[in-house]
Image (cartoon, grey):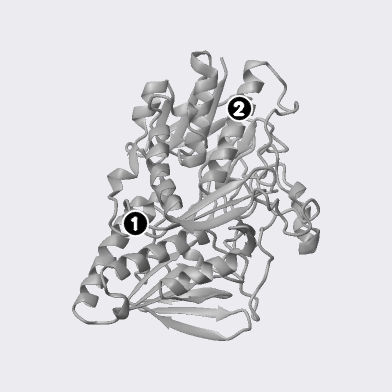
Amino acid sequence: MSRVVVIGAGISGHTVALNLKHLLKKNHEVLVISPNEYYQWVPSNIWVGTGHMVADQVKFPLSKPYKKLGIVFKHAFARTIHPDGDNATDKGFVSIEHVESGEKEKIEYDILVNATGPKLNFDATEGLGPDKSGTLSICHYEHATHTWNELQKIIRKMKEGKKQKLVIGLGHGGATCQGAALEYTLNVANLIKKMGLSDMADIRYISNEYMAGDLGMGGAYVRNNGYVAHTKNIIESLFTEFGVKWYMKNSVYKVEPGKIYYEHIDGTEGIMEYDFSMLIPAFAGVGIKGIDKEGNEITDGSLFKPNGLMTVDSDYSSAKKPYHEWRGDDWPTRLQNPTWKNIFAVGIAFAPPHSISRPRTTASGRPLTPAPPRTGMPSAVMGHATAENIADIILNNKPLDSKFKHNASMAKFASICVVSMGYGIRGLAGTMSVYPTIPDYTKYPDFGRDINYTMGEPGLAGHWFKWLMHYAFMWKAKANFGWSLIPD
């Protein structure tokens, strides 16, 4: 019997665990380690942050589906990975610390999947976060609940005739999740518009993107009603429709209560005042350490990069090349560690070779390079492909360096993004699909992507699709009847 250990139970880790157990059945063990005992459908935190949903609608206890499928669950922090074992054993193991008791335990594995997701690195920006300046977040259901509570206070003030300044966007020059910040901006603007309070709200979107619609993936040309349009034009038209002012090419470097300090790409510095602000922080690795057989920390980059993300089969030397020489082949296809081939990393846990958007800095050298987005659909697709590859290795007794059946490269699969602008039966959403996720100007010289499969359109149908997705993916995540038939 083989044991596969999965660290993390977010979208990518949960996808790996469910699909592995479905494929391996009772003949092999799947064990999940997570400090959070709840699964959360992160894309719907947008609606928690606007009061359309409550936290219990986007989360559920992991113990329920895991008990149903026979997955072992450890409610614990993974502290260290020992890929070569220690003096007592040659078998790789993870050292964990149980959340409730603080008890430490050694969990051996045959194959390990790192799916921890990110650490919300508020400390990367001076003063950023609810515990410091009071800027808010929607990255977690608890954050989103707090954000809605604060937004209600702002709405009450607007109803009293007091004009309010709302600033939403990215809180660091290297932050990602522009899509989430954009979606929250439009949902807040739509909510305020429906309440008839638009004249009392000064809504601003501040971002490290070079242009609106960059979304951390270099923007995209999309097919729209028979024409080819750039995401910049689509997003700017939505901002205009909802009365949102946009401020691009800005690196936020400090936040104080009521004030956001930023530097524009040309070196101009500014201060944006706010009454309410939701800023996405930078992401980093969660802090798990690699330890060698002698008990020393592995610091040569063979297991983790300096940012705490895991080394996989990327071409990391490509980051030194000019932007126009970057290729889809730079990106990992196996999500497998080159040194310890029984270790994989999926979702945000793996270290990308470079950004997708063109790297830039401000005049003083502050970053203006969105990190590559790997949440939502890309995380699930990578998780599913990795689960199928691991199951194939185990069930067919294949060596770990054999040819994999499924390519997990973001340069080989499409991504679908739905940006809601409201909730319920009536509403609007922008739906966009891009293929491939990583642009390839060698294969698609005109637009970087296959324009036949790269399309975007705002409308009511996309809104219904977004609404349906919430319930379909929550059903799937709970491992309810027919869950495996619902695509990622």
* Residue 61 locus on image (x, y percent): 33, 35
- Residue at the limit of the structure toward the front, as seen here: 226
Occupied quadrant, residue 421: bottom left
Mark before the other along the chain sequence, 1 or 2: 1
Residue in view at x 42 percent, y 34 percent: 477
In the rendered image, is residue 315 in sight?
no
Residue bearing the label numbered 1: 144
Occupied quadrant, residue 378: top right
Q: Residues within 10 Å of mark 1 (few under 14, many from 20)?
A: many
Image check: 383 left or right of 37? right
Closest to the observer, 468 or 306: 468
- SS under mark 2: helix
* Residue 353 locus on image (x, y percent): 70, 52
Residue in view at x 67 percent, y 16 percent: 396
- Residue at the limit of the structure toward the left, as seen here: 160
Image check: 479 left or right of 208? left
Location of residue 70 with respect to 215 vertically, above or below: above
Residue in view at x 37 percent, y 22 percent: 68
* Residue 264 locus on image (x, y percent): 58, 80
Closest to the observer, 461 or 476: 461
Mark drawn on residue 388: 2
